[in-house]
Image: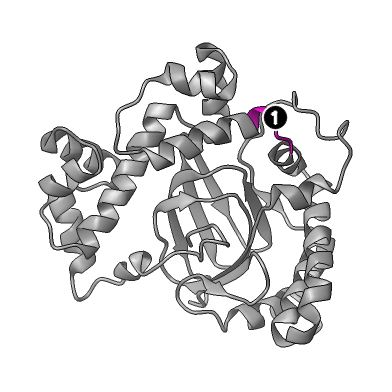
């Protein structure tokens, strides 16, 4: 094929209707007509076909083919994808971000820990970035070459992103003393203890920041406050449990940390558009095509939900 995007699409069309292992370290692919709402882990995501909208806190991002975005920290998000005009499915690739790999690509001066907090962006993929991805994905059919070439192509993909508008995210991700890395420590704690109440002061101390600075940097990096972050984690997990476990909404509300079933119902409806029972009736309907949105997620090494 002469068109690199066409060749990439042909490879990714082999994927299942959820994120699929490629056999290449940290690389996954998806062919899907639905989109799960869950925590997006640090990754680079390239859209090949179809379109995607993603809500992260106050940000609503729109993606078209040959665009990419970087997620630098674990963030709960609401996503929706659609096929292209011809009805062909959504196709995308992801690369889990390894800070150790990124750190080898520039000097300490280049990745200053005091850079401004990065913002969520959608960027056009350059021909050079698409070409690097194509050479990476050709390794799917060349297992004997993966061990040697995959690390080289991964570094080239990262290099191309570092040269673009989202390079600041990668620089901060690799620096242990950057604000982004400090906030990641707090995010890891919240994810591990999302059912528990918490005070902000110990989290700020964990990151080495004052409470005011912690609030400011957390919201700049995660696009939401720590309490909003915890709430979204609870609601996303509750939605998974409602679909796959034979329990009532109240018991699930308590299991994810809510003390009031009515508060849970109000906040659930605010986030997903319907109260829990009606939302689940929609997804469990035999005629619903949305159930596949919850059929699975990326392999842990790969990071992202469709």
> Which residue, given by chain and number where applicable, does mark 1 sit on?
178
Q: Say what secondary structure mark 1 lies in.
A: loop
How would you classify the magenta stretch by its main secondary structure? loop
Q: Is residue 20 left or right of residue 225?
A: right
Q: Is residue 240 above or below residue 76?
A: below
Q: Residue 264 location, x and y as percent?
A: 19, 38
Q: Nearer the viewer, residue 247 or 3?
A: 247
Q: Nearer the viewer, residue 151 or 236?
A: 151
Q: Residue 125 location, x and y as percent?
A: 74, 58
**Residue 259, quarter of the rendered image:** top left
Q: Is residue 179 above or below residue 98?
A: above
Q: Is residue 95 above or below residue 213?
A: below
Residue 42 located within the stretch drawn in magenta: no
**Range shown magenta:** 175-180
Q: Is residue 290 above or below residue 58?
A: below
Residue 179 located within the stretch drawn in magenta: yes
**Residue 120, quarter of the rendered image:** top right
Q: How many marks?
A: 1
- The residue lying at 47 percent from left, 34 percent from top is 58
Q: Residue 241 location, x and y as percent?
A: 24, 56
Quadrant of the image containing the N terminus:
bottom right
Q: Is residue 34 left or right of residue 60?
A: left
Q: Nearer the viewer, residue 133 or 90?
A: 133
Q: Is residue 123 left or right of residue 29?
A: right
- The residue lying at 43 percent from left, 71 percent from top is 33
- The residue lying at 54 percent from left, 51 percent from top is 41
Q: Nearer the viewer, residue 47 or 295?
A: 295
- The residue lying at 72 percent from left, 76 percent from top is 137
Q: Residue 226 location, x and y as percent?
A: 43, 28
Residue 275 in sight here: no
């Amino acid at each position: 094929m002469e068109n690199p995007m066409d060749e990439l699409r042909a490879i990714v069309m082999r994927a299942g209707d959820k994120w699929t292992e490629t056999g290449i370290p940290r690389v996954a692919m998806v062919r899907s007509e639905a989109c799960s709402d869950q925590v997006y882990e640090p990754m680079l995501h390239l859209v090949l076909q179809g379109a995607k909208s993603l809500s992260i806190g106050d940000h609503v991002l729109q993606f078209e083919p040959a665009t990419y975005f970087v997620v630098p920290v674990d963030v709960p998000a609401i996503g929706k994808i659609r096929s292209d005009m011809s009805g062909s499915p959504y196709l995308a690739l992801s690369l889990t971000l390894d800070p150790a790999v990124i750190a080898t690509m520039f000097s300490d001066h280049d990745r200053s820990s005091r850079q401004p907090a990065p913002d969520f962006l959608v960027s056009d993929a350059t021909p050079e970035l698409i070409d690097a991805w194509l050479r990476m994905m050709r390794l799917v059919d060349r297992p004997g070459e993966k061990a040697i070439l995959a690390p080289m192509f991964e570094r080239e993909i990262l290099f191309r992103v570092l040269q673009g508008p989202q390079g600041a995210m990668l620089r901060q991700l690799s620096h242990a003393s950057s604000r982004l890395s400090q906030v990641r420590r707090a995010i890891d704690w919240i994810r591990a203890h999302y059912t528990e109440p918490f005070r902000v002061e110990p989290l700020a101390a964990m990151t080495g920041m004052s409470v005011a600075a912690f609030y400011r940097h957390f919201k700049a990096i995660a696009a939401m406050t720590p309490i909003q972050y915890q709430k979204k984690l609870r609601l996303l997990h509750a939605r998974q449990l409602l679909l796959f476990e034979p329990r009532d909404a109240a018991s699930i509300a308590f299991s994810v940390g809510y003390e009031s079933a009515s508060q849970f119902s109000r906040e659930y409806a605010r986030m997903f558009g319907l109260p829990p029972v009606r939302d689940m009736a929609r997804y469990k309907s035999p005629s619903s095509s949305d159930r596949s949105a919850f059929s699975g997620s990326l392999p842990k090494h790969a990071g992202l939900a469709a």
